[in-house]
Structures are given as structure tokens and as C-alpha cells.
Amino acid sequence: MKECSELLHYDSTLLKALERIYGKDVDGFLNSILSPGSRLYIRVNTLRTSAETIIDRFNERGVEVYVDEELEEALYFPVKGPFKVNLVDKVIVVDKRAAESIYMGANVYAPGVLECKDVRKGNEVTVVAEDGTPVANAIALVNCEEVLKADIRRGVVAETVNPVYKAPKIRESPEYLEGLIYPQSLAAMYVTHVLDPRPGELVVDACAAPGGKTSHIVEYSRGKAHVIAFDRSRRRLSEFLTNLERLRESQFVEVWRTDSRYLHLDFSWIRADKVVMDPPCTALGVRPKVLDSKTYRDVENASRYQAQLLRSAFHILKPGGVLVYSTCTVTVEENEEVIEGFVEEVKCAEVIEIDIKRGARGVLGYRYSDAFLRFHPNIHDTSGYFIAKIVRKC
């Protein structure tokens, strides 16, 4: 088993930034993001089915699934492991994103394969991340060379049979394919509950792809809010639109490809009741990580970008409107400091306390620490997450 320092390549300044939050338990945080939580969450598409129906369907196939203690649309599967991966002669090398899915039991798909030599259909293989970390054993379903030479790489290359951690293959379940469920972390589900979108309101998702929060907004408002979704990435928007079609929610969402740093200029006509801003971040709270490499400069760059996005999104709010800011990272530079700097600059902005008992408050030492909501992987057995709520006063 590799040591934490071999898998997480963070420079000394970034580690000091993490120590500001976790103190002596920074190693506990770093170790926690190398493994999944004990629960794998999905969200039920409540416009089309019920939690009880989904539980019954999985139980009929012998799959354990339970409803969350607080959110009725949230279901979870127990995650089992870690298990030892057998090292065999045949190897498939996959990219970071694929490795972290296969680590949890997902099959090996062609787009994630980086290298695959002399692997024939039926061979047992060891699947490894690009740094050589073993993530699973699998059985090849095709001759790998044929896949790598194909003009369009698609489909399953190998069936995972012995991953490090075992959980249901959610994206291959009939419930997923029918659009009845959406894989989403528990912490991310709280964003929509904090936003509280209501029927008849104009609600904007400013960084929408791949669609988890947008679709949750649709379901939470029973399809009766006017939802506008923005994202700048053509690739991510394609995935977003596919998800909306799978969930059968396309008719509820107006989608635009644009750079959300300029919403206040390009869409100055919008006067939104609610805005959710989940900007690109360093994703330090996302787990499990098979490997990761980041520097403090990445944090600084993300923080500047987040402040630009927040500033623009706030300007399309109507007076009395609410903006919810969230990230899947943990640094104060991308969270508390972005919000507090923004509120200091924009006198019409007021931070509102989030009335949710789960999780923790913000990092101590900031003016609005008690108003923020945080989830810590080493404390709450979730992903690392931050949520803030702001109202426009004028």
C-alpha cells in the first residue's frame, strides 16, 4: 500500500493552508480523501418515482440500499472494503478519473484507457492508475488493441470483478438508465435545500454542468420553477443535456453556453429570485482520490476565478433574491475568504445563517463563520464541502 505522500502531491504551502483548517489532524484529512466514505449516495428523481419504489427494486435484486436519516430523496448503499487487488501479468492503465471510478467497482470503459498491451478477450488483468497504483482486477471483454485503434473509443473494455472498494455499479443499473436516480454526494444535495427553490420563481444555475444541482432544483420545485442553466464547456454541456434527457427533465430547463463571469453583461435582463453558484475549484474535498497533484498556486488561481463568477452572478439577482455559493473543496481561500471579501466589497450583499444542523460551521476566525456550512471527510464521513447563503438587500 502506498503512503499518503506518494499519492497526494501537494506542495508545502498548500499543506500549510490545509493545516489552517485541520491543525494536527491534517494527516487524518489527507488519509480520508484517499478512501470513499462508508456510504455511496444517489438521489431519487421524485418527479418520476419514490424512494420506496427504488429501494424495493434494488432489494429484489439482493442489493442493500437505505434511505438517509434526514433527506427523503437521498438513498445510500454501504461501501465495502478495502480489498486486496491481485497483481497479474496483464495490465490495463487508466487515467485518473477512470481509476477513481474503477476503484469503487465501475467497469473499465474505453475512453479512460491509456495503455493496454497484449490483452486478449477473456484475460484476467490488473487495472492500474497512471502512477501504477492498482485499483481492481477485471476480465477483458475485448482485445484491447482493437479498442485503442478504433476511430471512436467507446464501450466496456473489461468487467471489474475485484475492486479495492465494492459498491453497486450505479451507472449500469436499470434505474439509472431509466432516469429514476442520479448519483450525487449527500453534501451536494444540501445545496438545493439551502437554496429552497419555489414554484413560480426564476432560478439560475450559473455553472450547471453536468447537471446534478439543476436537476435537483427541478425536482425540488416539482418542475414549477423557471430554471435557466449556464456553462461554458461544450463537452460538459453535452453531458448535461444527456443527463436532462435521461431524467426526462429537458422541458423544465433553459440551457445556454456562455462564460458565467459575464452574465451581468450578456444576460443583463435577468432578475433572478434564486441563483446557485458552484464554481470550478481545486476539488480537494472529492473522494476517493487514487492520486492527486496540486499546488497552492492552483488554490490562488481558483479563488480569483470564483470571485469573478460570484460577482457576476450576484448582479443578476433581484433585490431580496438569494444566492447559494458552494464548492467541493476545503481551503479557506476558496470558501470563507471568497465570501467575506465579496461581502466587504458589495454593500448590498448580506450573509444569511444556514439553518441545517448536520455538518459543521465555517472555519473559526472569520466574521461569518457561524453562518457557513461545512462537511469534513475525516469528521462527517462525506466529501469535503462548503456552502454559503447570501441575500441581495438592494
Image (cartoon, rainbow, N blue to C red):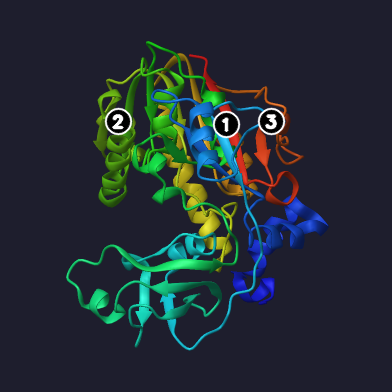
Label 1 vs 3, first from the N-terminus: 1
**Mark 3 crowdedness (10 Å alpha carbons): few <14, some 14-19, many ≥20:** some
Q: Nearer the viewer, residue 333 or 322?
A: 322
* Res. 23 in view: yes
Q: Nearer the viewer, mark 2 or mark 3?
A: 2
**Mark 2 crowdedness (10 Å alpha carbons): few <14, some 14-19, many ≥20:** some
Q: Which residue is mark 2?
A: 248
Q: CA distance from mark 1 to mark 3?
A: 19 Å
Q: Nearer the viewer, residue 178 or 102?
A: 178
Q: Is residue 308 above or below residue 297?
A: above
Q: Which mark is residue 368?
A: 3
* Res. 292 in view: no
Q: Amino acid at mark 3?
A: Tyr
Residue drawn at x 59%, y 35% is 387
Q: Is residue 30 above or below residue 4?
A: above
Which secondary structure, mark 2? loop
Which secondary structure, mark 3? loop
**Residue 260, x across and y down, in percent:** 34, 38
Q: CA distance from mark 2 to mark 1?
A: 22 Å
Q: Is residue 106 left or right of residue 118?
A: right
Rendering quarter of residue 47: top left
**Residue 268, x across and y down, in percent:** 29, 24
